[in-house]
Image (cartoon, rainbow, N blue to C red):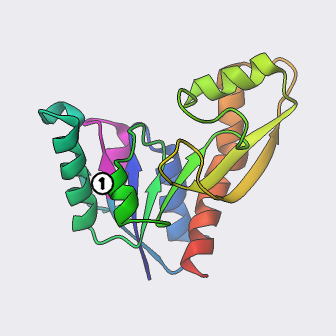
Amino acid sequence: MLRVVVMVSGGGTNLQAIIDGVADGTISNTQLVGVISNNPGVYALERAKLANIPSTVVSPKEYESRAAFNDALLATVSSYKPDLIVLAGFLVVIPEKMIDAYENRIINIHPSLIPAFCGTGYYGLKVHEAALERGVKVTGATVHYVDKGTDTGPIIMQKAVYVEEGDTPKTLQQRVMEQAEWKLLPAAINKIANQ
């Protein structure tokens, strides 16, 4: 049984896709043991509560330094004894010591086909704004292992999504979530749980 901790910063739509996947058997051999957010009061925490998954908030604002926050974050993650850490819209740089401690056991979902529109500064709507500005006809999402670079770890799975005439960053973001992210992340977790 793969013990999974999901890390979130916002509404938790990818978290919900994972919760639903475990519940309906799309993700097998997996137990969601914890949800960690860097923001108190986000809806992702409510999703965890509704699914009876323990959750914790570790906010950088509560620590006097980034080093202290990083130590607290690693301690909190480790307290759940995870086999896999899933970054599902977690907008905090993962400390190097956590990457060392959980090498090849941290995965992230990114809303583009890496290597396009990724790296520092590319997150949320910014990714979709850049894709539309560039005029790409196909975008999508990528699940990859987390290494010490930004969006540079080995790719696990990708799914393409067509850009449509008249798309705005918001409509494109929604389509990428619905057609790629919410399918890809559960599929990647299931693949890891059953390899």
Residue at (57%, 49%) from the top-left corner?
109
The answer to whether residue 147 is visible is yes
In the image, taking residue 75 as reference, residue 11 lies left or right, namely right
- Quadrant containing the N terminus is bottom left
In the image, taking residue 159 as reference, residue 173 lies left or right, namely left
User: Is residue 185 positioned above or below 4 on the image?
Assistant: above
Residue at (54%, 77%) from the top-left corner?
193
x%, y% of residue 129?
Answer: 68, 20
Query: Is residue 140 on the magenta stretch?
Result: no
Q: Disc 1 designates what residue?
A: 49
Judge by depth and name the residue closer to the eye, 122 or 39: 122
**Quadrant in which residue 188 is drawn:** bottom right
Task: Please tell me how crowded label 1 is: few (under 14), some (14-19), or many (20+) other residues with Cα within 10 Å.
Answer: few
Residue at (14%, 35%) from the top-left corner?
62
Magenta-highlighted residues: 35-49
Query: Is residue 38 on the magenta stretch?
Result: yes
Judge by depth and name the residue closer to the eye, 89 or 64: 64
Judge by depth and name the residue closer to the eye, 126 or 167: 126
- Element type at marker 1? helix
The answer to whether residue 25 is visible is no
- Quadrant containing the C terminus is bottom right
Q: Amino acid at mark 1?
A: Lys
Please identify the residue farthest to the left as the structure is shown.
64
x%, y% of residue 103?
Answer: 44, 65
Label total for image:
1
User: Is residue 105 positioned above or below 125 on the image?
Assistant: below
In the image, taking residue 145 as reference, residue 91 lies left or right, namely left
**Quadrant in which residue 59 is drawn:** top left
Residue at (74%, 26%) from the top-left corner?
131
